[in-house]
Image (cartoon, grey):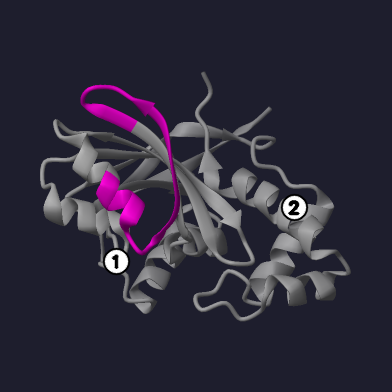
Amino acid sequence: MDSQRLSLARIKIKFPDDIWISEIFKKFHDVRMEIEYFLPYDLEKSIGNAIVEIIHYNLNPIIEEIKNHRSVLEFSLLEQEENRIKFNVKTKDPYLLYAVINCGALVDFPVNVREGYAYWRIISSRDRIDKLLSLFEKKHINFELLRIGNSPYPLEDEKAKLTLEESEVLDKAIELGFFEIPRDISLEDLANRLGKSKSALSVMLRKIIKKKVVFEKEN
C-alpha cells in the first residue's frame, strides 16, 4: 500500500478565558496537563468529551475547581495517584475541533497544554493547513504557528478511508455549515436533508470525525 508524505504543523493555541482549562492555569501556574483524546460526545448540543491527565503536587483543589466550573457538564475521575490524575470531562465542544474538520486535518494526540496554551500537532497537506490557519485568523483565534515541515509519519490510505456514503454525508455537512461556528444548520435539519434519523446521523458523524480527525501512530 502506498503512503503519502504530508506536512506537520506545530501550532500554539490559546484557550478561551471561559473554558475551565484557562481557569486552572490562572490559579495553578505549575500544572502539567495533557489532553489524551477529544471527540464530540453530543453533536446536537455541541458537547465534547475529553480524557485529560494532570500532574501536580496538590490535586484536590484542582479537582474541585474543574468539577464546579461553569463550562464543565460532567466530570469522572478515571485514575488517581499521589501527584497525578486522569479524568474524563464533558464540556461545550470548542470551535477548534470543528475548524479542523472543516479543513480536513488530523490531530496528533496527545495535546500538551502549558500556561493555558494547547500545543497542537496538525497533520495534513500543506494547502489544507494553510486553509486552517486562515480560518483561525478569520475567527480571531489566538494562535502562533511554531513550525511547519514534512511529517515524519506516513499516512496509509486505508487508515482514514471513508465509505462512499460517509464521504457524501461529510461533504453535505460541511457544505450546509454544520461545522461552522455558529452552526448554520441543526443536526435535526441536516438529518432531514439527508433522509436519516437524527440518532443514526449522530452515530455516523462521530464515526466519520474519529476517522478524519484523530491521528493514531502505528505501533
Residue 91 visible in the current orientation: yes
Q: In this view, does 2 lie above or below 44?
A: above
The residue depicted at 11 percent of the width and 41 percent of the height is: 30
Q: In this view, does 201 lie above or below 89?
A: below
Amino acid type shown at disc 1:
Pro
Left or right of 155 in this view: 2: right
Q: Where is residue 26 in the image (x, y as percent from the top left)?
A: 14, 56
Does residue 23 belong to the magenta stretch?
no
86 over 7 or under it: above or below: above
The front one of 89 and 50 is 89
User: What SS does tag 1 mark?
Assistant: loop
Is there any visible trace of residue 11 in the rendered image? no
On screen, residue 183 versus residue 112, left or right, reads: right
Q: Residue 72 magenta-drawn?
A: yes
**At which x and y percent is residue 23?**
22, 58
Tag on residue 2? none
List the residue tagged with mark 1.
Answer: 16
Neighbour tally class for label 2: few under 14, some 14-19, many 20 plus, Cα within 10 Å: some
Rendered residue at 53%/49% (across/down): 39
Q: Which of marks 1 and 2 is nearer the N terminus?
A: 1
Q: Residue at x 30, y 67 (%)?
A: 18
* Circle 2: element type: helix
Q: Give the range drawn in magenta.
A: 64-85
Disc 2: which residue: 204
Residue 94: percent from the left, percent from the top?
Answer: 43, 62
**Of residues 76 and 49, which is closer to you in this image?**
76
Q: What residue do we see at 39% from left, 26% from top?
A: 79
Res. 1 image quadrant = top right
Please name whichever residue, 185 or 176, is drawn nearer the observer in this view of the structure.
Answer: 185
